[in-house]
Image (cartoon, rainbow, N blue to C red):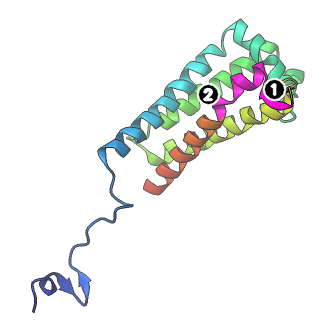
Amino acid sequence: MSMNDQYLIAGKPLVEAPRRSESRTSLETLGIHISRYALVVTLLLIGVLKFTAGEAQGIQPLVASSPFMFWLYKIFSLQAVSNLIGAVEIAVAALIALRPFSAKLSFIGSMGAIVTFVLTVSFLFSTPGAFQFSHGFLLLGDAGQFLIKDLVLLGASIWTAAEARKED
């Protein structure tokens, strides 16, 4: 029996070393924590801001032009719609933040964030002036510049959902 064979049983290693794709570097671990909790802080701050009159007025053109959300203003007041959206964002942030205690709750929160950011990314296509043509180029207008960050937040939400689901 060679030295390498003594650690094999039926041709398989007695203890398998983690594959490169399964082990995490400290840089990757740092990136994981920053991504998750930056998403939490962003959702929390944006959610709290929704309770102000200025933010309620600011999001009104986006929500009113959305084929998915316009109907909210037929049921609720301007401030009530903003408060509802803010409450959802705060709840989603809290659920994602619970990752050290519950992968399942964090997954649910991440799914809520995915829905949130799919809706806000859709505003890019439903809000007049989000895209503008200038000198033959398609550029982001003011609303588009405000909303484009939500693509990155959508990606982070998908990643946190996948990571939490993997551990569940």
Mark 2 sits on what residue?
Answer: 89
Residue drawn where x is 65% and y is 37% of the image: 151
- Residue extending farthest top: 53
Residue sitting nearer the eye, 138 or 102: 138
The image quadrant that residue 7 belongs to is bottom left
Q: Is residue 96 left or right of residue 12?
A: right
The amino acid type found where label 1 is placed reads Ala
In the image, what residue occupies the spot 34% across and 62% down?
20
Q: Can you say which quadrant of the picture contains the C terminus?
A: bottom left
Residue beneath label 1, please?
130
Residue 73 among magenta residues: no
Image quadrant of residue 48? top right
Asked if the residue at tag 1 contacts the one at tag 2, i.e. Cβ–Cβ closer than 8 Å, the answer is no
Structural crowding at the residue carrying mark 1, measured as other residues with C-alpha within 10 Å and reported as few (<14), some (14–19) or many (≥20): many
Q: Position of residue 96 (x, y in %)?
A: 50, 37
SS under mark 1: loop
Q: Which residues are magenta?
A: 136-150
Q: Is residue 144 magenta?
A: yes
Q: Is residue 43 above or below residue 10?
A: above
Q: Which quarter of the figure is the N terminus placed in?
A: bottom left
Q: Secondary structure at mark 2?
A: helix
Q: In percent of the image, x 42 and y 34: which residue is there? A: 34
In the current view of this chain or complex, which residue is farthest to the front? 135
Q: Check residue 110 in the rendering and tell me which mark sits there, or answer none.
A: none
Q: Residue at x 64, y 29 (%)?
A: 149
Residue type indicated by callout 2 = Glu
Instruction: Report the Cα–Cα distance between label 2 and label 1.
Output: 23 Å
